[in-house]
Amino acid sequence: MISYSGLLQKLSDKGLTKTALTTELGVSSRTVAKIGRGEKIADHVLEKIAAYLGCAVSDLCKSVSDNPLLQTLRDEKSIRMSGGLYHELQVRMTYNSNHIEGSRLSEEQTRLIFETNTIDVGEGIPVDDIIETVNHFRAIDYVIDVAEEPLTEDIIKELHRILKQSTKGELLSWFAVGDYKKRANVVGGRETAKPKDVPAKMKALLSEYASINSVTINDVIRFHYEFERIHPFQDGNGRVGRLIALKECLRFSIVPFIIEDTKKTYYYRGLSEWEHEKGYLTETCLDGQDTFRKLIAMFDIEE
């Protein structure tokens, strides 16, 4: 749903009504009705109205989600609110997701980077750990922005590009930041999809997922496993996979999960043994949901 509160305020400031748009700008009565119902109107019409009112399009409307959790994150993100759910999601998910993959930054250092854009690095902290922390903050922002859009290859590749940009991988011609891998890789000693097979496997996975009528937490977990099994990128698959899971949970009003670094042994076991026992990964992700529920409870937000 779209809120045109900014547009209505601008019209009020000029002493105009919605109906006046039909005479002042030649906007159709159908478009005016859409504004009243909170439906999206054509971009070129919004641009025309914004030009007339002397403001930016972003001043006229904003997306309003039926999911109170997502709307809270969007509201707090828009003003970079300190001390709220958005703040804690950024710090806790970024720290845990990066630490699972070997980052040496502590949660306190991660929090300092988010809150002050500075860091007391101590000794032996790789530059990429710091860059990828900042990039992960930006990736979560992107997830919040596109949460309600259907999951596509473009969105998945953009998450990888955001996460890996400006890292040492970007200096390697074969690393393919923001694109599928060009060299074979393994995970946990297990072979993953060959580079030549990745595009077809990803299309098939997304097509199968899109065919689900009512997505549940179990569907998100299964997608996460299948994505990690394909391992479509040269590096960063775990973090991209968990960001996708966050996006899809927000999209379908499912409480998201944060896999804590202390649970990574169970998480890896769940991924490696999925084909024999799905409960290991499922229970770990449900435990991660409980972690997120505690965050929601801290801020008294409706699930």
Image (spheres, rainbow, N blue to C red):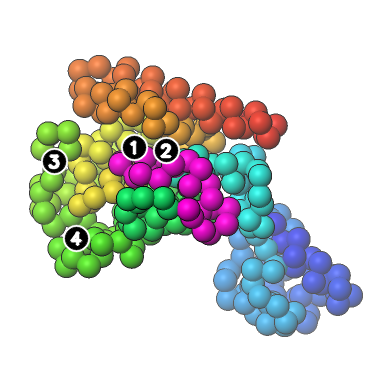
On residue 96, the disc is 2
Q: Distance between the residues labelled 1 and 2?
A: 6 Å
Q: Is residue 69 visible?
A: yes
Looking at the picture, which amino acid does disc 2 mark?
Asn
Looking at the picture, which amino acid does disc 4 mark?
Phe
Question: Which tag, 3 or 1, sits closer to the chain's start?
Answer: 1
x and y percent of residue 136 in the render? 42, 52
Question: Which tag, 4 or 1, sits closer to the chain's start?
Answer: 1
Cβ atoms at labels 4 and 1 below 8 Å apart: no
Q: Is 232 placed left or right of 99 in the picture?
A: left
Q: Is mark 3 on a helix, strand or loop?
A: strand
Quadrant of residue 223 in the image?
A: top left
Q: Distance between the residues labelled 3 and 1?
A: 17 Å
First to last magenta residue range: 95-120
Cβ atoms at labels 1 and 2 below 8 Å apart: yes
Q: How far apart are marks 3 and 2 (CA)?
A: 22 Å
Residue occupying image coordinates x 70% and y 78%: 55
Q: Distance between the residues labelled 4 and 2?
A: 25 Å
Looking at the picture, which amino acid does disc 3 mark?
Val
Q: What element carries label 2?
A: helix
